[in-house]
């Protein structure tokens, strides 16, 4: 099936606007223009419950509602809600923006290095335009793509974005659609791709009017957030169209390079042609039309390789997925935490398995889930997995939003960075991670319904019970909770923070320079564990390059014997060196191995050796 972006208010030029709405539950539909001049225009019924009409005398900036059998409601496909989720929708002219990225193609999947950020807390201003001043820092760091947490209109001005209720409307307090376009255009000039986190598994509770228009929801399933969206019941074809059009809208009208699909395990769909597969096919076709690289990245805790398997092999055809198993294995080793979902992790073998396959759980019993979990991926493409030490979930869903910088010593921060950036996967950094930001990232809201506010507070307390974190949970509705979560960019120029930032930059540079690191083929890798010493030895190679990587998770010095292949090896990175604020390295710059070598290692050792080619 071929899709285009047709829903909502489409400005046609010369004061003419087409309004198109799916409202099969309504007997009559009209569009009520409320500004600049109030007027009422009926819309014509079309097949399958659509209503449409071309209205003259409507310019960009005009405000409107729909009248469904006399009930006044905002447009579900509104492009802008300047007065918030309960206010009128606004006509927007996307052609008014002049793009300068005509030759932009976008990075290959192997070149992707993500930097996830929340628009509201990344800067004091909390806007798209304010991000632009920091793009040079990000480019210098070496990241190739920024990933924005959701920007669909949510209630108030403070929210993570997962309470969005207008999937097409860009958050007004962030700068609206024009602000987002300016940011994307500027990012492309800086050589940075832009991805957007979108939520197709639920809509937020406040300002959610979709059920008034049609069967957007179903009682057949439940999600952690309430009613499931209707992707496989009566009327589901049009619900699917709504969200597929939404995806194409972001890619086409905002020139985005890809979408991160939130929690696809909560998309309930038993149809023969799953929504996700249909979405992937539509996006791939649109990317070909646009002549750009476009990617879909899923968040999934299913450990189901069908998510990232090609459609020709029975998969959904998504390009990559976030890999929680990798995070859990690494975090549990670094911190010693074993509560909640960390119960299933904590051994060096877990991390070795994650490095080899992406998933740790591939069918074995999970104590946390109390059942078997996962399936072996049988994939050789490391670019199918996005890995991280931190992200908005695993920081923000702690009771007090602590970052790794406040949980482990400096040596382990360097170790964590090395494991992620020297891995054969696509890395993701969470804003501020690169310089050890100390501000927490807390959960915050600005709902207007007192009952909803109380329910959110109670829900957060109950959510953390399984992790046994002590102390009071910060009030999500308190503006101080939001303010505490803002970054302090000035830290990146101070002491340890500056050194860590330089360390990240060096890791990314090595990842690009050395062919063995740039090659993300999982078949070209060997992972060996030294369980007694808690040391991991990783060997990676390509046609003309080979590296040996050593990670020590021991809290004491050790001297394991490592199977470094015979030959001469040049040291390219050593976290123990004084320039990285280590205690000083005892490892020479050049090693000659006979096939095994004893290596004296300090706390948090992170070493990289490159084989010297023989003449």
Image (spheres, rainbow, N blue to C red):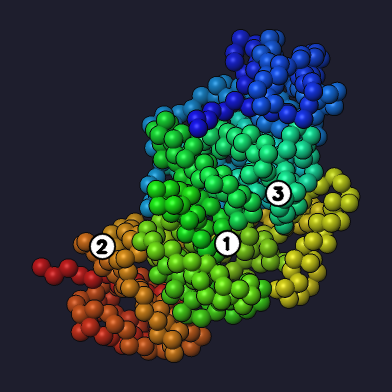
Left or right: 62 in relation to 407? right
Percent of width and height locating residue 268? 64, 51
Percent of width and height locating residue 224? 72, 57
Residue that numbered label 2 is attached to: 542
Q: Earlier in the sequence, mark 2 or mark 1?
A: 1
**Above or below 404: residue 518:** above
**Above or below 89: residue 56:** above
**Above or below 412: residue 192:** above
Percent of width and height locating residue 609? 30, 72
Left or right: 89 in relation to 568? right
Left or right: 437 in relation to 568? right
- Mark identifier at residue 228: 3
Residue that numbered label 1 is attached to: 301
Mark 2 nearby-residue class (10 Å; few <14, some 14–19, many ≥20)? some
Mark in front: 3 vs 1: 3
Of the pair 256 and 606, the residue shown nearer to us? 256
- Label 1 residue SS: loop
Find residue 524 and report its image quarter.
bottom left
| Residue drawn at point x = 67 percent, y = 31 percent | 77
- Label 3 residue SS: strand
Of the pair 309 and 597, the residue shown nearer to us? 309
**Quadrant in the picture for the C terminus:** bottom left
Of the pair 48 and 432, the residue shown nearer to us? 48
Q: Earlier in the sequence, mark 3 or mark 1?
A: 3
Res. 589 in view: yes
Percent of width and height locating residue 274? 55, 46
């Amino acid at each position: 099936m071929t899709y285009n972006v047709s829903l909502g208010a489409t400005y046609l030029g010369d004061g003419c606007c087409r309004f198109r709405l799916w409202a099969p539950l309504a007997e009559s539909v009209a569009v009520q223009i409320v500004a600049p001049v109030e007027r009422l225009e009926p819309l014509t019924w079309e097949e399958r419950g659509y209503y449409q009409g071309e209205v003259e005398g409507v310019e960009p900036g005009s405000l409107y509602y729909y009248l469904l059998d006399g009930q006044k409601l905002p447009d579900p496909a509104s492009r802008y809600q300047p007065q918030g989720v309960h206010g009128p929708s606004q006509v927007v002219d996307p052609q008014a923006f002049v793009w300068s990225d005509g030759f932009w193609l976008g990075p290959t999947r192997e070149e992707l290095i993500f930097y996830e950020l929340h628009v509201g807390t990344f800067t004091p201003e909390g806007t798209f335009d304010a991000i632009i001043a920091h793009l040079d820092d990000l480019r210098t760091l070496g990241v190739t793509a920024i990933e924005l947490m959701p920007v669909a209109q949510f209630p108030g001005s403070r929210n993570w974005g997962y309470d969005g209720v207008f999937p097409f409307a860009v958050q007004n307090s962030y700068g609206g659609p024009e602000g987002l376009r300016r940011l994307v255009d500027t990012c492309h000039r800086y050589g940075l791709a832009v991805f957007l986190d979108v939520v197709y598994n639920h809509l937020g509770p406040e300002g959610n009017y979709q059920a008034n228009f049609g069967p957007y929801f179903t009682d057949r399933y439940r999600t952690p957030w309430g009613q499931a969206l209707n992707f496989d019941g009566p009327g589901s074809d049009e619900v699917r169209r709504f969200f597929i059009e939404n995806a194409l809208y972001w890619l086409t009208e905002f020139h985005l390079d890809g979408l991160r699909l939130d929690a696809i395990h909560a998309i309930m769909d038993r149809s023969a042609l799953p929504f996700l597969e249909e979405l992937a096919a539509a996006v791939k076709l649109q990317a070909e039309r646009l002549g750009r690289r476009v990617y879909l990245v899923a968040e999934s805790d299913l450990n189901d390789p069908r998510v990232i398997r090609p459609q020709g092999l029975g998969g959904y055809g998504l390009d990559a997925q976030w890999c929680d198993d990798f995070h859990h294995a690494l975090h549990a080793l670094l911190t010693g935490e074993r509560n909640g979902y960390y119960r299933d992790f904590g051994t060096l073998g877990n991390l070795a398995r994650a490095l080899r396959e992406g998933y740790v759980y591939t069918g074995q019993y999970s104590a946390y889930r109390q059942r078997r979990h996962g399936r072996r991926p049988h994939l050789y493409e490391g670019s199918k997995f996005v890995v991280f030490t931190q992200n908005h979930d695993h920081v923000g869903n702690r009771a007090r939003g602590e970052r790794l910088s406040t949980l482990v010593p400096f040596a382990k921060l360097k170790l964590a960075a090395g494991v992620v950036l020297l891995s054969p996967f696509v890395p993701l950094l969470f804003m501020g991670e690169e310089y050890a930001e100390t501000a927490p990232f807390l959960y915050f809201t600005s709902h207007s319904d007192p009952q909803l506010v109380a329910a959110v507070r109670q829900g957060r307390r109950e959510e953390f019970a399984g992790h046994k974190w002590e102390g009071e949970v910060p009030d999500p509705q308190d503006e101080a909770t939001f303010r505490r979560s803002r970054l302090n960019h000035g830290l990146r120029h101070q002491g340890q923070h500056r050194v860590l930032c330089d360390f990240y930059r060096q890791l990314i540079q090595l990842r690009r320079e050395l062919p063995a690191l740039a090659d993300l083929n999982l078949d070209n890798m060997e992972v060996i564990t030294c369980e007694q010493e808690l040391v991991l030895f990783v060997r990676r190679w390509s046609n003309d390059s080979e590296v040996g990587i050593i990670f020590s998770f021991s809290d004491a010095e050790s001297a394991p014997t490592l199977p470094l292949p015979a030959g001469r090896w040049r040291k390219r990175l050593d976290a123990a060196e004084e320039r990285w604020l280590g205690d000083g390295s005892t490892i020479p710059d050049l090693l000659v191995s006979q096939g095994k070598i004893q290596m004296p290692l300090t706390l948090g050792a992170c070493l990289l050796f490159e084989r010297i080619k023989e003449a």
